[in-house]
Image (spheres, coloured by chain):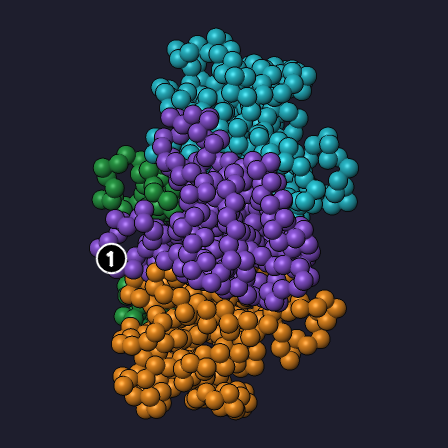
Chain colours: A orange, B purple, C cyan, D green
Amino acid sequence: MPKLIAIIAGAGPGTGSAVALRFAQVYPVVVLSRSQSSLDPLVRDIKQNGGHALSIPTDVTSSSSMNSTMDRIKAEFGSDMSVAAAVYNVASKFMKKPFLEQSQDEFLGSLEPSIKGAFNFAQATLPFMLNQHQGQYPPTFIFTGATAAIKGGSGLSAFAMSKFGIRAMSQSLAREFGPKGVHVSHAIIDGIIDTEKTKAFSQDVPDSKIDPKWIAESYWFLHTQPRTSFTHEIDLRPYSETW
Amino acid sequence: MPKLIAIIAGAGPGTGSAVALRFAQVYPVVVLSRSQSSLDPLVRDIKQNGGHALSIPTDVTSSSSMNSTMDRIKAEFGSDMSVAAAVYNVASKFMKKPFLEQSQDEFLGSLEPSIKGAFNFAQATLPFMLNQHQGQYPPTFIFTGATAAIKGGSGLSAFAMSKFGIRAMSQSLAREFGPKGVHVSHAIIDGIIDTEKTKAFSQDVPDSKIDPKWIAESYWFLHTQPRTSFTHEIDLRPYSETW
Amino acid sequence: MPKLIAIIAGAGPGTGSAVALRFAQVYPVVVLSRSQSSLDPLVRDIKQNGGHALSIPTDVTSSSSMNSTMDRIKAEFGSDMSVAAAVYNVASKFMKKPFLEQSQDEFLGSLEPSIKGAFNFAQATLPFMLNQHQGQYPPTFIFTGATAAIKGGSGLSAFAMSKFGIRAMSQSLAREFGPKGVHVSHAIIDGIIDTEKTKAFSQDVPDSKIDPKWIAESYWFLHTQPRTSFTHEIDLRPYSETW
Amino acid sequence: MPKLIAIIAGAGPGTGSAVALRFAQVYPVVVLSRSQSSLDPLVRDIKQNGGHALSIPTDVTSSSSMNSTMDRIKAEFGSDMSVAAAVYNVASKFMKKPFLEQSQDEFLGSLEPSIKGAFNFAQATLPFMLNQHQGQYPPTFIFTGATAAIKGGSGLSAFAMSKFGIRAMSQSLAREFGPKGVHVSHAIIDGIIDTEKTKAFSQDVPDSKIDPKWIAESYWFLHTQPRTSFTHEIDLRPYSETW
């Protein structure tokens, strides 16, 4: 019987790992990140929880890298496999600096994940969502977004462009692939995510950082919605966040 | 031990009933509607599923009616009860007709549920959400909204005003009560809801109406989110909907 | 020849007066406000500038008051007169206080201008915009809005509901009357308006308050747009405003 | 005395030319487009109307091309010149086709004007807006946008990304340069623009295409707003447009 898998791009520590762990409770998951080393602890975690994980170091902004990743996935799960869920969680490089001090290289560079990366990943995975022959839930494509997806900011042109851009793509794909039964969603993560890196932030206010496990639960919930009742956009923020 | 209850205003057939049934799996539910007769089958359903329901015919647009309903609730569950979830699902009367043919009475009348009703219900229930002493999940207040909450339409001034208004209130309450731990959400229901009344609509396209059970599941999911990770706004629409 | 006039509701000091003065450069203007005394200085100003003004104390939230105002206007300009421009600038009473401390009366009272008032004024004036037989510019209906039209705030339920509501009505009327050649616009005034009352605010930053004359110029500009090129929504804010 | 000029990027037939003609009533204008041949008739028009125009074939997506254009401008007007107005009207290539049939090259290619081009043009011109020593009006930077700036569409990922992206940049620059006195605006052009190319469209409904002259008048009006009263975003659409 053809295999159903989940693929997480941007599966580093934090949101990506939490999402992978959640979907691994039900599907074999393929986890992508630039470096193998950032994937290793995740694969260990998934296995310890009884799940199945395949980690493939991938530069999603390179179509050849993304293609060879897909080849590897097909080799592992069969070329008749289906993608039950694809999550695009690759971070745009955050850059906040005066516009006139930005070089074209850093400006364009910081946009690559949201443009080339999202394009490559969506083109590689969507065909395997349309061939869905089985599956309890509609195939689901989720983009991780941010507040900067709906509001630009001083010094944030590149970051806002990348986040607005991801939202534009997610709306466009939802309108194209929704009628074909694919659930495309966009999540606006509005606040600091609680990770190793952000440990020192906002310690004075309890529960003031977003729990990546609950980003994962929310993504999982989106995945379970039937095609009668798709949510396209959700926001997630701590109770204490000003917005 | 103080009781934790859920209250659903607008618990008629369709969304309100489905939400009541879902929350009744965990809490005793109080169901409000103008007429007792529309509540009876719901109460029967809830009891058959092993839940506990109290139905109180209420005109939420009347503060005295809402007050006596609260008295009745306190008599039943104790005045130290807490409201785990309050759902405001009272329909604005849908009116689509040329603006210049609308009488002031029908215009204002169609706004009453979204203004007086929402105000009375929120004022009556929020104090019992702030006193939360127990409860696995943060107290949750959910407003049912519609597409007309974000887009006006020809002949729809009153309807759009009521839906924009509900959204204004839900954002304002979220910003005021969120920091106090109350989860306030707004759901944009974008499409035809699958009920007895809409049976004849869109029969040619399978699954093209929103399943009220999944509105209920989505509301329940919102309720389970911890205060680190509140969703304020979700949309729900069938895969086949043009938007 | 039938007369073309402009009508300004909410023609008190500040925006309303500035708008009346601007439109009085071209049309006889009718200025409405609750009290005659607040209209007197405006009428004097208009006359000194060579314009023609008719002031009528009016409670726009009362349909009978609005009706007798229209009778008075028809008596003055002929019942075949046309309204070239109608501006709804009646302030919602600003109220910022904890939601649970608001009485139903003050909540509902603060909504009256945006609901009853806007309804009455639009119903009274639109028929005289549709009968346009002359006029260099398309008949124009402008609603003054505020930031609270797109964002609710803590303690601001009533204010946000009234401003969201005005926006809902302006979108709905634009979609209904636009195709009939009426230009309906909504202005989001985002910042402190420079008036006598606000003299003491923001004195440290030069030019940090919105100049009512430029609200008026912007409204006038909207009025001059031909039907090929209608602007529905504009925002206005000082360069120094955070948004 | 230092010179004040206006620069229009994307000065081909239609909007760009109309804007150039309008601003040429007051400033010497520099008009940029890929090909000299599309600039020639415009320069002729401007001169016939008594204006002064410098046309420079420029590929704004190339920083070296943009740089040599700036050198040419400084040679002509002095390196102490100021930019009174900069208009970015370079079209994203419109592409509507199934997402899975798009090549990475055409996808990325269609984004270039909105990303590289907008970045290069903004970086080149903004320094000459900050040095403003004279000028009756605040220096003004206007981006031409489209409906796709706020709504994605099936088959329109690239187009929507580019338009969302332009909006992200315009908001970010407004928030950064507004407090420095630069007026940054974004115009949502919602409808068919009336040009030679679109002559055959919508002929049955009179005035149903946007008049580029009125886009130009609207841009000019934005330019005249003082810093007390900046409009950041306007929409422009024919009365007959469904939206």
Give the quarter of the image for residue D214: top left
Chain ID for label 1? B
For label 1, the residue is: B205
Residue A121, placed above or below residue B129:
below
Q: Nearer the viewer, residue D50 or C14?
A: C14
The quarter in which the N terminus of chain C is drawn is: top left
**Residue C194 position within the rendered picture, expressed as x and y whole percent measured from the top left:** 68, 35
Dot 1: few (<14), some (14–19), or many (≥20) neighbours within 10 Å?
Answer: few
Amino acid type, callout 1: Val
Total label count?
1
Q: Secondary structure at mark 1?
A: loop
**Residue D206 position within the rendered picture, expressed as x and y whole percent measured from the top left:** 28, 34
Residue C223 visible in the snapshot = no
Could you tell me which residue is drawn at 38 percent across and 71 percent down? A140
**Residue A194 position within the rendered picture, expressed as x and y whole percent measured from the top left:** 62, 74
Could you tell me which residue is drawn at 56 percent across and 81 percent down? A13
Q: Nearer the viewer, residue B238 or C187?
A: B238
Residue A159, placed above or below residue C29:
below
